[in-house]
Image: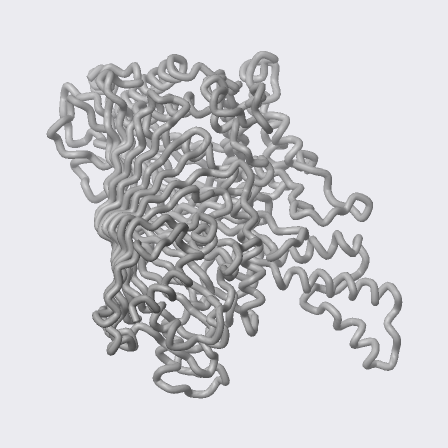
Amino acid sequence: MAGLIKGQILKHLSKFVKNLAPSQISLSAIKGEGELSNLELNEVVLTELLELPSWIRLTKATCNRAAIRIQWTKLKTVPIQLQLDEILVELETCEELRDPSTSPPGVSPPGAGTGAYGFTDKVVDGITVSVNLVYVTLSSLAFTASFQMSRILLESKTPVWKKGNLQMTRLKDLDRGEVLIFKELSWQTVRIEARSTVNKDLTPLRLITNQARCRITIKKRMTDSAILGCRLVLILDDLLWVLTDDQLKAALHFMDSISGLIKKATTTTQKVKAERKLKNQNSIPGGGMQMPRARGSTAMGGHGSAAANTFANYDVFETSYHFYCNRIDLHFCDDPGGGRSLHPNLANGGAFQVSLAKLQVDYYPYHLARGDRKHWVRYTEASPHRTWMNANLASFDTRLLDVLLSGRNHTPLSRAGKPAAAAASAGGQPQRGDREDDGIRDIVVKQLSRLMTENFVVRLFDITVYCVSTTSHSGTKLREMIKGDHGRLHIPEDLPFLHLEFTSFYYPGDLDFPLPPPCVMVHLNPFTVWLDILTLVWINAFILNLQKSVNSLQASLDLEQSDSLYADIKLEILMPRVIVGSNIKHKIQSDKKPSSLQVHASKISIANYRSLETGSRADLATVLELFQRSPMFFGAEFPSKPEDTPVVCEKFISHATGVDGVREAPTIANISYKKDLLWTDARDVWYVLVDSCWAEFDVPCIPQRPIPLIDAVPLAAWIYIKPEDKKRSVVPGGEGGRPHRKLLMQYYSQDKSQGKELHVLAHTTRLVSVQIDHHQLIFILRLAEELAEMAAFLSADTASIDPVASTVAIGALLPQVDAALLLPQQTAFAQGLFL
């Protein structure tokens, strides 16, 4: 009996394990126990089964011991126990992507069906796996990384993620012929370490996490066991990560070495999987990969059984991945050996802490662009992000049809095919031009109905950024620099501080057809910023030092600039507040002296695309005309001398007249069906609109009644940042600008940056009213001294760390200013002016 079972094990495991011999198997059939030792796994088969990305190749995988226990009489309720001791895996990045469409003999393609879902599938899906240690090494062109995970447990759970017998860990919907399986993966610790093979002086990048869990819900079709969807939720309680500037450089080196491969692989495999998922769905109405059903109804629309209702509550309508962490503490600090800044208080370096509370990231890679989002986690259809994207889609549809029909009379896409049908029903025959137009509409509608999106939704419920701490501040309580205002303004706890959505578009399968540009929308709820000069100086020096080391890395990224940078971006900030205090001590203290200056704004909107809400070209032309009337900006003196940096640069003029497009506008003569057909307008001019902003002083003698400095006034600004002139040089021996390992050191050490320019045109259409008294004027003058000192240190640090010539030109037009200077008697003023 044991020999017969051994033969079956050898037969089934031979395609997964190389050189498997009977001597490696220890088996007791009666007890239901067995053990295998010294297993060398088949790398090709394992690569396909694990669906490893096509930019990774598995070169070796071993397991020293595997033990299995089966309770033959309780297979329906008690899972099979599989215990693995140590698993060692070796991976390497591929210079050329693997072909994901081919599978080794005897292995079904990922996600494909394997036969009707039966008893054997239930037993296999319910298996419990425990692993003592998994150790993975990854080798790339510029880096080696190791990944160690200990005390791993994969087990079946009930839909509410509690332990139960196997029959309670599955849900079926017999009407739809689908089954849901619930598995939870947990581990004790994870240790990640990455080392550079190019610059061995860099400190290794290390990350250690505590116990965490991953909840996996899988939906299968019962007729053929094909996987229809999966929901994966990774949950971390707390995460602490200390990063020095050298470790950040190491992280960027690592990302650079694999970023090009990841992007190319993601684009390829995403289309293949999306095509397969579309084919696996029986119906694709208006929602996602599958139409979400109302809870409590069956597929036929009637009232279903309790089992069907329960299935609907936990259904997976489309594949999605989710991450949640209760708290993340990030500590950024200088490497030992002194600080980067010339500021005397930062001579010995500093540390900077950021705390993130309740971070949630949702990723939906296969969503129909026009599908609803009712089944998305904590998402409402009335979301402004959803409304904004629908408006962008409608605008794209109209513009695409305009181009394809070359300006001929046509009806909207929503009425495609109706004109010809209406003519036929009226007894007439549609004209040839109408038939051609309807044919074009039908093609466009068919293609756009397959348009899919890749979506990232990021929510952060609170943030705290602390001021920099130095050796002189050791032992003192950290001071806050940025803090969300949930508590102060009594904002509902379920309203996040940050809501970010990133949406990119693609078509499933091998299809090249015009796409809308990616969309990014960010919404920030109220927060307060306490301006701390020392912290700003440290951050500037820290970033400059980091940027100096990675300039060449950024230039070597194997990405098309148009693909990576072209996007519609909109940022909304609700009720921000900036508090500025003075560190200069007064010789004579008085309750009438201001303790701080507060600058408020009701709402700030920032966007890089043109519309009536986000600034039109006509609005910019009007502003340019106002600036042109001012002799200050179009005169012969400063700042309009030939050697001065112009405030009104040529970019603003070309943008207002619409001649700064990134490519020629499509016409019937030059039309192509590439994805960027309609990506013609520039996206590098930003429009900033402040609905209302005002400034006021906090005075100790009146703690609850701030004294106004500037009355509420709207403000608008146009911003253009000319990018650095990065000259990409190809090192001999490299391909496509990416050199071989021996030449990476030389390549990374080259400086290719030529500086950047910042141009700002600010204006308001309202009266600016300013009121200030003696004490407030003294406060403003002292504050100006501190800001001037900060600017001096920023300039000095920039010159010593990364001496790149950068220029800033800011112009402001105020049509009328009403200033009231409230002064005491002359003697008192003369005495107080020199306090």
**Residue 158: x percent and y percent?**
28, 71
Position of residue 817 relative to residue 746, above or below, is below
Residue 725, picture quadrant = top right
Tell which of 195 and 728 is nearer to you.
195
Q: How many marks?
A: 0
Residue 834 in view of the camera = yes
For this rendering, which residue is in front, 182 or 511? 182
Q: Quadrant of the C terminus?
A: top left
Q: Residue at x 50, y 72 (%)?
A: 291
The answer to whether residue 487 of the structure is visible from this angle is no
**Residue at 42% over, 62% down:** 11
Q: Is residue 154 left or right of residue 509?
A: left
Q: Position of residue 161 (x, y in %)?
A: 26, 67
In this view, the residue in front, 611 or 232, is 232
Q: At 42% across and 80% down in the image, what residue appears?
A: 173
Which coloring applies here? one colour
- Of 631 and 677, nearer the camera is 677
Q: Position of residue 505 (x, y in %)?
A: 57, 52
* Residue at the extreme left: 475
Q: Is residue 301 above or below residue 797?
A: below
Q: Quadrant of the N terminus?
A: bottom left
The correct choice, above or below, for 196 with respect to 9 in the image is above
